[in-house]
Amino acid sequence: MGIIREFPSRGITFQRLHVEATENVVRTCQEEGISILLHMSALGARADSRAQYHRTKFAAEELVRQSGLDYAIFRPSLILGPGSRFLLDMKRLMAFKLVGLVGGGVYRLQPVAVTDVVRAFVLALERKELRGETWELCGPRVYTLKELLEAMARAWGRGVVFFPLPAGPLRFMAKLLDGFSWFPVTREQLTMLEEGSVCGDDRFYSTAGLVSRDVEEVLKEV
């Protein structure tokens, strides 16, 4: 469970949706005798992250680890697949043939196919040796943001011109406007983009005996 942006005036915050909601799930599992809990976190979750999103994701992980339940925690990078809001938004944007690259598009990402994430959850439910662990989930390739958007344009047959969009002015605009849902990016999202989203290892795939799917094949399905 989780949200990608906050709207505090409407009671929608990372603390409530990441931490307090997880606390409720853990308590319900304990009260109802549910012994296995599979938890979706996020790559980059840690206590000292610059992003509150990641700090609250880590706090939720700690609740799961300390719950006494038979758990598995998954930290996926950017998840791509049919129905992905990010991909649908990018496909619409690329129809205009001109796309801005935040910070010149140098930020590093290692996106994962949604089918890999689903397989991970199913296997963790079926195989006890995959539980009691925190697993990172990424695809086989590290992209810069520019490379990933270029791959999207190729997959969708779009002739797109990319231009650099300096992060500084965009962050200033986000400071003024990220409380409005129509503004496309928040300061928090820019911080997470700057931190990157690349796995430190592929332990889950080697342990589970899986091969991660090429996300460029996934892009053709959108």
Image (tube, rainbow, N blue to C red):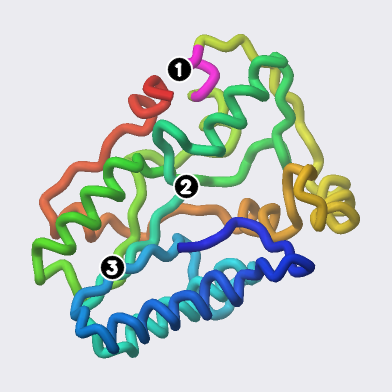
| Quadrant, the C terminus | top left
Residue under label 2, please give it. Answer: 78
Residue type highlighted by circle 2: Leu
Q: Tag count in the figure?
A: 3
Residue position marked by numbered label 3 in the rendering = 38
Q: Quadrant of residue 146 in the image? A: top right
- Whether 14 is drawn above or below 97: the answer is below
Q: Amino acid at mark 1?
A: Ala
State the image coordinates of residue 72 (x, y, percent, origin top left).
26, 70
Residue that label 1 marks:
155
The residue mark sitting in front, 3 or 1, is 3
Estimate the x, y position of residue 157 in percent, counting from the top left. 51, 10
In percent of width and height, residue 28 lies at 34, 82
For marks 3 and 1, the one nearer the N-term is 3
SS state under label 3: strand
Q: What residue is rendered at 39% in x and 55% in y?
A: 76
In the structure shown, which secondary structural element does the residue marked by tag 1 occupy?
helix
Single out the mark in the foreground, 2 or 3: 3
Q: Quadrant of the N terminus?
A: bottom left
